[in-house]
Image (cartoon, rainbow, N blue to C red):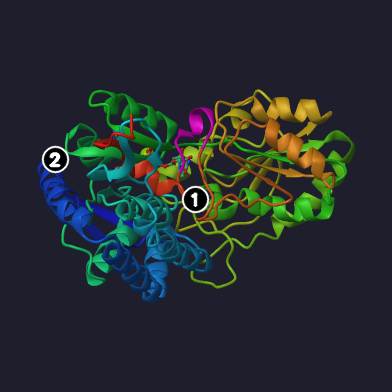
Amino acid sequence: MTHTIVNPADESVVTTVAAASIDDADVAIARAAAAQRDWARLAPVDRARLLRRFADAVDGAVEELAAIEMRNSGHPITQARWEAGHVRDVLEYYSASPERLFGRQIPVAGGLDVTFQEPLGVVGVITPWNFPMTIAAWGFAPALAAGNAVVLKPAEWTPLTSMRLAELGLEAGLPDGLFQVIPGKGSVVGQRFVTNETVRKIVFTGSTEIGKQIMSGCADQVKRVTLELGGKSANIVFADSDLERAAATAPYGVFENAGQDCCARSRILVERSVYERFMELLEPAVAGVRVGDPADESTEMGPLVAAAHLDRVRSFVPDDSELAFRAAAPTGPGFWFPPTVLTPARDSRTAREEIFGPVVSVFPFDDEDDAVRFANASEYGLSGSIWTRDLSRGIRVARAIDSGNLSVNSHSSVRYSTPFGGFKQSGLGRELGPDAPLAFTETKNVFLAVDSPSVE
Ligand code: NAP
Ligand code: MG
């Protein structure tokens, strides 16, 4: 079986990719388990060196990876370049971890008590199509650093950069079988990761619906699971904020990657006294988003990933009844949808559900309590922004919002050195930051009796 890869910007065929079977997945998992046993025995300094070489190999392939991602996923070339550089940075950051997975020595009577952070074995990483290589790296880099092997199933639509990353790992000297990418269907390969007993943990990024299925599948074997799921994040603009800046940056808080971003600030909440002024400022800012050819260095937004996803986004905007304004976009070929601003009721479908496209809804609010209440009136809790000149209020509101990643006077959500993940139905566990490798270990406690008259 094969799967055809289509360039979302012009609908041309890029290549075809083999789709693995259940048997293929089992063979790969068994190879990974064999490689892991040797990997875990390697001196920490040698594992660190190989991960640094992997980072160097990615550094040398930034342009190549960016070009692949542009053609496979439709990402603007400047964005794709950033993503490839981020993969390098994540690998570099976690290449220090093999020598820093410290255990503890705990005072007890009668002997010596120490803890060890033991690798899990084989980790299954299942990634979505929206940020194929960065999300892959958030899983495989800390997992490898902690002494595990990784099998990775990329999204069916966007496997190409992950496949190239696995080759780069081999070229850098990673042991054969330690990091394998197995393209195929989620319902076949992804599902097999969940049911194969050799896989000790699943790291899943994708929809909340599939995440719930994976979590219940993992319960059978008490398999460890990390979930990074959907979002419907709020961008809260207070009247005392730098309104020009808040309006100028709001499009970039939601339309980046054509809104196919779990951190998209897809609900803008504006204090009622400045609502009209904000909308006057937002309209030209949205019109200014440069939508078009991903190969153009000045392009800020490309197409949606696939025809089926374009249909889904369109279904949220069947007519112009909620429309405030929209920007221009190419009409086709390619899967284009224009940056679109809606002013729906708070309980409408567009206000509640994750659209995962370049569509944002704007709402007025009355006061701080009202803003926090509405921001939290969501099953999701991933990100959010707060715009105010009152930094006490910035921190107060950030603490009051049930969400994993907040920023004040910024839309930044992701840094490899800080933890990332969701509250409520946006996920379970955290990726990135200094503690990520620990999530790929079990804590083992060893007590050693010490024969000494002076010790109880
Ligand atoms: P998805 O449909 O849930 O798929 C994600 C991955 O799971 C794909 O590789 C998919 O394979 C696989 N899969 C599908 N069914 C499976 C099954 N039964 N068992 C095991 N694996 C299975 O999500 P998507 O449509 O690719 O991505 C969009 C969603 O991801 C959005 O909701 C978005 O918010 C979320 N997301 C969250 C984050 C975060 O960090 N929180 C980041 C990015 C995206 P196929 O490709 O073969 O279907
Ligand atoms: Mg899907």
Q: Nearer the viewer, residue 452 or 189?
A: 452
The crowd level at tag 2 (other Cα within 10 Å; few <14, some 14-19, many 20+) is some
Q: Is residue 113 left or right of residue 260?
A: left
**Discs 1/2, front:** 1
Q: Give how far apart the Cα atoms at labels 1 and 2 are.
A: 34 Å
- Residue 398 drawn above or below residue 328: above
Circle 1 residues within 10 Å: few <14, some 14–19, many ≥20: some
**Residue 390: image location, x then y, percent:** 84, 44
Q: Which residue is mark 2?
A: 22
Q: Quadrant of the C terminus?
A: top left
Task: Relative to 46, say whether 182 is above or below.
Answer: above
Indicate the secondary structure of the residue bearing disc 2: helix
Lower sequence index among marks 1 and 2: 2
Disc 2 residue type (three-letter): Ile
| Residue at the (30%, 35%) spot, across then down | 111
Q: State the residue in front, 42 or 272.
A: 42
Task: Let me know if residue 246 is in the magenta part.
Answer: no
Residue 92 visible? The answer is yes
Q: Residue at x 29, y 64 (%)?
A: 164
Report if residue 345 is visible in the image.
no
Q: Is residue 428 magenta?
A: yes
Q: Quadrant of residue 50?
A: bottom left
Q: Is mark 2 within 8 Å of ligand 1?
A: no
Q: Which stretch is magenta?
A: 422-430
Q: Quick check: 171 left or right of 92?
A: left
Residue identifier under label 1: 433
Given residues 115 and 447, the one toward you in this image is 447
Instruction: Where is residue 264? Give x, y as percent.
Output: 58, 45
CB of residue at label 1: within 8 Å of ligand 1? no
Ligand 1 quadrant in view:
top left
In the image, residue 367 lies at what x, y percent? 84, 29
